[in-house]
């Protein structure tokens, strides 16, 4: 197949589309990219909805990106029409342009998160309010223009409106090959201290208040050292809760190219611990990346994460700082368990969540003839 990856996606901020593209290429498909990154994070887009007078800035940036997309799309159409178009993550508006430009071509929309779900998770729009209805309209308008709707879990698929449900395909987020390259060596557990890392945007989804409270419980345990990377909505609260723990290093951010090495250098990678509806439906990118990097993943015990990870990770109840602290203490005191989980986690990720494995269902949905026996 010949795919055209299209949109204003930003692989530095949101690596999901990079995994999809890598997987398609590894499957033998050709992928050309027509990409004009918008360079606005999810948090920045949410901020604009909090302050509607800033929306013209978004419209202006989007128009400039779309002008570049139109030029690139027409160039590719003159060269060779693609068999399918993949609209990258956060493509709620891009899919409208894609449908105008590629009227007769199958379009797959990577609907990793809904606008309504994100707004609700971040406290922007309560159910039934005007903003929530607007976000739902944006979601539905985007979904109507897609022939295939790509989601990452069955729980996310269940939230789609009825008219889109039969077009959904579940594609795990997975991790790119650069993460697996770091984890292949499976370094032995750190001597003396359990090194733990969290990388994220400190949103309610991540449950960083739970992490902060757990760090406070670990303040007297010198066997556990933690690195917290990122900032965001709940950053101040997390740092306030963890203030009593002297073995926490706070980094505002780390460039994306350096993250695989950073995570691989730690024994444990923390996932999410939030209790919001969205937190109970997803398996975040950081979980797959942690497994691929050879770290032990500790994350919340939710239905999708249990199904994706099984016994290859440590699962604790969402929103329970005591359980999280206890899990880290146990790992700090059991080098054998730590080594076993590192090995089993990497093996699981290598078997199921490499890019070429994650895109199987997408290729079969868009082009059934691509189905092959494993």
Image (tube, rainbow, N blue to C red):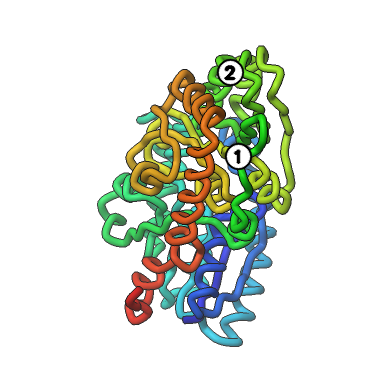
Q: In which quadrant of the rendered view does residue 225 lie?
A: top right
Q: Dot 2, how many residues are within 10 Å of its Cα: few (below 14), some (14-19), or many (20+)?
A: many
At x 36% / y 36%, what residue is drawn? 302
Q: Position of residue 361 (x, y in %)?
A: 37, 66
Q: Where is residue 1 in the image (x, y as percent from the top left)?
A: 47, 81
Q: In which quadrant of the rendered view does residue 364 lie?
A: bottom left
Asked whether 305 or 125 is in front, the reply is 305
What residue is disc 2 on?
A: 218
State whether residue 131 appears in this view: no
Q: Position of residue 248 (x, y in %)?
A: 69, 24
Q: 108 left or right of 21?
A: left
Q: Residue 334 carries which label?
A: none
How many numbered circles are shown?
A: 2
What residue is disc 1 on?
A: 267
For the C terminus, the quadrant is: bottom left
At x 28% / y 55%, what residue is drawn? 165
């Amino acid at each position: 197949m010949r795919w055209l990856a299209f949109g204003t996606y930003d692989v530095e901020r949101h690596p999901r589309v990079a995994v999809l593209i890598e997987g398609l290429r590894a499957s033998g498909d050709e992928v050309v990219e027509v990409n004009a990154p918008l360079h606005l994070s999810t948090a920045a887009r949410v901020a604009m909805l909090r302050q509607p007078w800033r929306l013209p800035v978004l419209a202006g940036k989007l128009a400039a990106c779309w002008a570049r997309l139109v030029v690139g799309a027409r160039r590719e159409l003159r060269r060779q029409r693609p068999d399918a178009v993949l609209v990258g993550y956060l493509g709620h508006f891009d899919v409208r342009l894609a449908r105008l430009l590629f009227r007769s071509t199958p379009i797959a929309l990577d609907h990793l998160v809904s606008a309504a779900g994100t707004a609700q998770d971040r406290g922007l729009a309560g159910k039934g309010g005007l903003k929530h209805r607007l976000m739902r309209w944006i979601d539905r308008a985007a979904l109507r223009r897609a022939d295939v709707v790509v989601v990452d879990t069955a729980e996310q698929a269940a939230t789609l409106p009825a008219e889109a449900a039969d077009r959904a395909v579940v594609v795990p987020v997975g991790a790119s090959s650069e993460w697996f390259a770091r984890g292949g060596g499976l370094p032995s557990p750190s001597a003396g201290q359990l090194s733990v890392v969290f990388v994220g945007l400190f949103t309610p989804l991540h449950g960083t208040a739970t992490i902060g409270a757990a760090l406070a419980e670990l303040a007297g345990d010198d066997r556990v050292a933690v690195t917290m990377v990122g900032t965001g909505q709940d950053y101040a609260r997390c740092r306030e809760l963890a203030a009593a723990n002297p073995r926490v290093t706070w980094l505002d951010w780390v460039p994306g190219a350096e993250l695989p090495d950073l995570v691989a250098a730690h024994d444990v990678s923390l996932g999410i611990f939030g209790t919001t509806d969205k937190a109970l439906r997803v398996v975040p990118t950081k979980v797959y990346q942690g497994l691929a990097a050879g770290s032990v993943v500790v994350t919340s015990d939710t239905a999708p994460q249990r199904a994706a990870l099984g016994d290859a990770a440590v699962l604790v109840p969402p929103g329970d700082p005591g359980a999280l602290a206890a899990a880290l203490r146990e790992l700090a005191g059991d080098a054998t368990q730590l080594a076993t989980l590192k090995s089993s986690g990497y093996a699981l990720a290598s078997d199921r969540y490499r890019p070429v494995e994650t895109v199987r269902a997408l290729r079969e949905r868009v082009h059934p003839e691509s189905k092959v026996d494993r």
